[in-house]
Image (cartoon, rainbow, N blue to C red):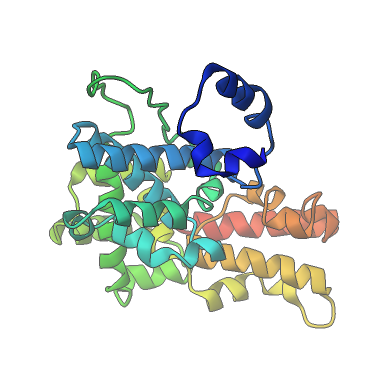
Amino acid sequence: MEKYQRPEAWIAIDDEKRKELVDEIAPLPSAKQFGTEEAKRFDLLMFSLQLALLKGSKRFDTLKKQLLEIASALEDQTGIPAIAHRAVLIEEIQTDIWWEGVNVPLLELVRLRLRDLVQHIEKGRKAIVYSDFADEIGDGVEIDLPQVGEADFARFKQKARHFLKRHEDHLVLHKLRQGKPLTAIDLAALEKMLLDAGIGDAGDIERARETSRGFGRFVRSLVGLDRAAVSEALGEFLSAGTASAAQIEFVGMIIEHLTDQGTMDPSLLYEPPFTDLAPTGPEQVFDEDRVTRLVSRIREISDSAVA
């Protein structure tokens, strides 16, 4: 292997050297760790996007939409510290201004900073398509992918999130963040609020309603819950003098999730990061009765966004 460390060894590769490289050198393990399967697929997407930019390929728009959908999915997971650390970049990618000055170094920066984060995209969003782009002469034939509309919806979500964050003092938003039950009139007011501001159209509202199982849940996912309100709602599980350190930490993780995401599917208690603390689930931390009450309370908090 030492002889191939010298530049002159690569000047002329005859059949004998080629066979040696294939048989002896290629199988050697690499010290470079390329990461998870999701990271490698993201690499492929980003390299394809960079190449499309350089070539002025029509595929650029399709690849761009895939990256926007990934950014949107990551933005929904900012409760994970590693993703929160890159929140500014993730938000900037979803703005038109960022793309006006995009170049290969910027896209490479995105690849390097986000490749290890895509593994955290929640299961329900992993229908994102990573195409295997074969080397071909020309651009090939473009086809419509079912997730192409995801980019437009991702932009709607981003605009809605920023708008709602600036209007958290609105009466209905205050109720929503406090976990107080909403009425049909409250939800209609939220819809009108976004429509009047030109944030989206009726189609966006309907899609938000369908994808989140209710428009209140959708808005709650954008603005989150007030931490103090969540802590109070889960107070019985944090009783001083009776809760163990593990129980306090476990409930603290639930509070973090609800504060950031606004709602929570109790099945997540059996997935990371909760299983990092309790590998077999909440039953490892609480007795059966308290687990039942905890799951019920989580559902109550989440359902308070539904009229």
Rendering coords of residue 123 (x, y %): 55, 41
| Image point (56%, 22%), residue name | 18
The picture places residue 287, in percent across and down from the top left corner, at 85, 58
Q: Is residue 306 visible?
A: no
Determine the residue positioned at 18% across, 60% down: 97
Q: Residue at x 31, y 77 (%)?
A: 169
Residue lying at 26% horizontally and 24% vertically, measured from the top left: 144
Q: Is residue 17 or residue 33 the one in the foreground?
A: 17
**Residue at the limit of the structure toward the bottom, as seen here:** 240
Between 263 and 41, the one nearer to me in the picture: 41
Q: Nearer the viewer, residue 305 or 11?
A: 11
Q: Is residue 240 above or below residue 8?
A: below
Q: Position of residue 206 (x, y in %)?
A: 28, 42
Q: Position of residue 146 (x, y in %)?
A: 32, 28
Q: Is residue 109 above or below residue 40?
A: below
The vertical placement of 169 against 250, above or below, is below
| Residue 37 appears in the picture as rendered | yes
Front residue (pair 129, 159): 129
